[in-house]
Each structure stands twice: as structure tokens, then as C-alpha cells.
Amino acid sequence: MSVGLLFPAALTALFALIVPLIIHIARKSEQLPTDFAALRWLRQKPKPRSRLRFDEWPLLLVRLILLALAALWLAQPVLFGAADRSSYVAVVPGAQFDAATFKNSRLHWIAPGFPAIDTPQPAGPLPIASLIRQIDAELPTGTPLTIITPTVIDGADADRLRLSRKVTWRITDGTVAASEAKLVSPPPLSVRFDTDNRGPLRYIRAAALAWQPAGRKADIDTAGTDAPLPDQRRILLWLAGGTLPDDVLRWVNEGGTVLAVSDARLPDGRPALPVWRDDLGTPLAEARPMGKGRLLHFTRAMTPAQMPILLDADFPAQLRALLAPPIPPARVAAADYAPLTGGRTYDQPPQSLRPWLALLIALLLLVERWMATRRGRSIAP
């Protein structure tokens, strides 16, 4: 452990230590006249003698210590390396374990807030992978970490766990409550088109119909570019050339999603990323974030000659994945999800010493007031 200062410039307040020194030196002691008759025995020219004298030096010392502690409090002292380094055991909800085998360890559930193991077992879908990374980032370097998990983890993500330390990965019996399957409904579409872009409309209608079960109509509305914009819960396909209108850009910034044709002129200065490629790797569509929404646009004209995928049987599925990306699976076998090493090490936040200093200052202030106001002392400075 080591002590440091977050604001060392505040130590310049130590110059205030000279104030009580000046006050104690300059104070005038109470003078009492004394009758003395034999003045002839005194020298005619006595030599005055003076010496530096500190009256009530214990009180002066307490005041100097108070000022020094106040300056130190302003400098924000902290203690590095004071975190608990005892063994940490994290338990995935649903795993079976015996708490008696971990008497000298800290046991916590892998859940938001990391509740203690003696609290009720957390329920509901949990981002297990993200929580494990958070535990690794918050624990000091060198702290032993053990993770107890059932055979199947529900709450994994697409990125393999890579932590900053070697983890004891224990797989035990147990069951994880099966999360309800989230059926993503087909995205509702709203199409705004001009007379020069009526051709691609049939491919959009065919794809929207293919998304629906047999016998159900496609959830799509079509209108000209002068029609009002739809609700932001719908996806807008802008089949019109030229500059995107300001109301469309505001609609995107407020959280909407727009897919524009290739001859639509988009705002400059915003980098675009390819989000759809053909079999040769050539980008078919690009995306760029705008405010709270997303702006997509095709990189080529929506004609079979320029975009042969329009005639592909897989076009509806790929268009749906572009407009409403599927939810990645979250269940994985624990044996295949054991953490790897080599992750980033994070600096631990220091522990502030200001609360303890404030308590010490308060106690010394009480002592100083008692010494300054007690009976039987000389006149206070």
C-alpha cells in the first residue's frame, strides 16, 4: 500500500501555519502594577531584555496540527493498494455448490450489484458474460477468482471471455431456467417513392410478403414522397433520388431507421460502414449512425442488372437481417465458454482518506475549543 495526493498543490495552504504563530507572539499578557518603594537601588539606565516566549504552547500545537490537517484534507489524500485481495468466488445462478467449502472466501452471485450468496438467488435473464468481465475488472491484480457455473450458461455473448487473470472454472450440476424464446416479428415497412423509382417497389413488396406466415398480408404501406412520415416504430424505405428532405433527417435523428436508394444524396461528413455484401464481397448497403437513429442506403441501383440478388430466393431473408438484425443466441455449454487469459488489466481506484481526516479534524477541533475556553487559563489569544 502507498499514500498519494490527488491535488498536491493544496499543500500551499500550509503557509497558514504562520498565522497562529504570529498571534501567540504578538499577544499581550495581562500586566499588573506592583508597588516598589526603594527606587534608589535600581539602576538609572536599566538594559531592557526581551526574549521570544510562547504562552500556552499545547494550545498552539493543537492549532498548528489543525491547520496542517486541513491543508492535507484539501490535497485529497488517497491510499493505493488497500482493496481486499482475499479469494473471490462468483456463482452463476442455477449452479449447485457447498458454501462450507469456501469459508475463507467471498461468495457472491453473478448478478447486477453482485449480491452476497446468502441472499435469494437472482432470477430472470442475466448478462452473465458482461458481469464476469466486470468482476475481473474490479478485482485487484492477483486476487484469486473462482467461478462456479452449471453445465449450460444462459447469458453469453458473441465475444469469447478473455480475462486479465487465470480463473478457476468449476462446472457443477444444476439447471438454468430456460429463457423465453424471443420471436422477432417482421419489421413493419413504410415506403415513400417518386415516379422514377417505382420499379424497386415490387421487390420490396415481395420480400415483406415472404416474411409473413401463409395467408397473412404484408405489413407495408406505400405512398408518394409528399405523404406524412410514419411512426418511428416502422422502417422507412426512401425510394426517391435527390437530397434527403430535412424532415426525413430529423425523423432519423429522433430514432428512426431509413433505407434510401443509391441515387439519394446523403449528408456529408458522416463515415459509412458496409453492412451487406454480395457473394464477391462487394458492398450492397452501408450504414451510418445519425442521432438516435440509423441511416442505411444501397450502393447500387435496385435493378436485376445492378443487383442480381433481387432475384435470389434468399433476398427477403437478407433484407430482413439488414433492417432488423436477429438476436444472437445466449445459451452455450460451460465447457466451451471457459475464460481465456490475456485480457486487459485495469487500475483499481484508490481509497480516499478524506473521511478519516475529517473525523480527526473534528476531534481536534473539540480539543482546541476545550483548551481555549477552560477556566483557570490566561487570556486567550
Image (spheres, grey):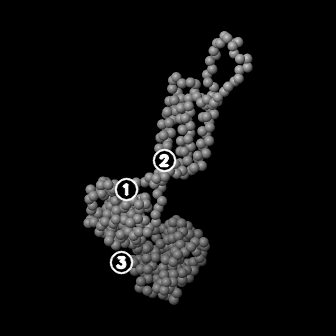
Q: Which residue is mark 1?
A: 86
Secondary structure under tag 1 reads loop
Query: Considering only vertical position in the picture, is 139 above or below 337?
Result: above
Look at mark 3 in the image and give the residue it sits on. 213
Q: Within 10 Å of the Cα at label 2, are there few (<14), some (14-19), or many (20+) other Cα atoms?
A: some
Residue in view at x 41 percent, y 59 percent? 139
Ranked by sequence position, the earlier of labels 2 and 3 is 3
Residue 201 left/right relative to 32: left
How many marks overall?
3
Q: Where 14 falls versus 37 (above or below)?
A: below
Q: Single out the mark in the foreground, 2 or 1.
A: 1
Residue 258 seen in the current view: yes
Rendered-image quadrant of the C terminus: top right
Give me the disc on residue 353: 2
In terms of depth relative to the viewer, which is nearer, 380 or 48?
48
- Residue 124: percent from left, percent from top: 33, 62
Element on which disc 2 rests: loop
> Which residue is painted at 49% across and 43% down in the image?
357
Query: Residue 41 lies in what quarter of the image?
Result: top right
In the rendered structure, which amino acid carries the disc numbered 2? Leu
Indicate whether 134 appears above or below 313: above
Q: Amino acid at mark 3?
A: Pro
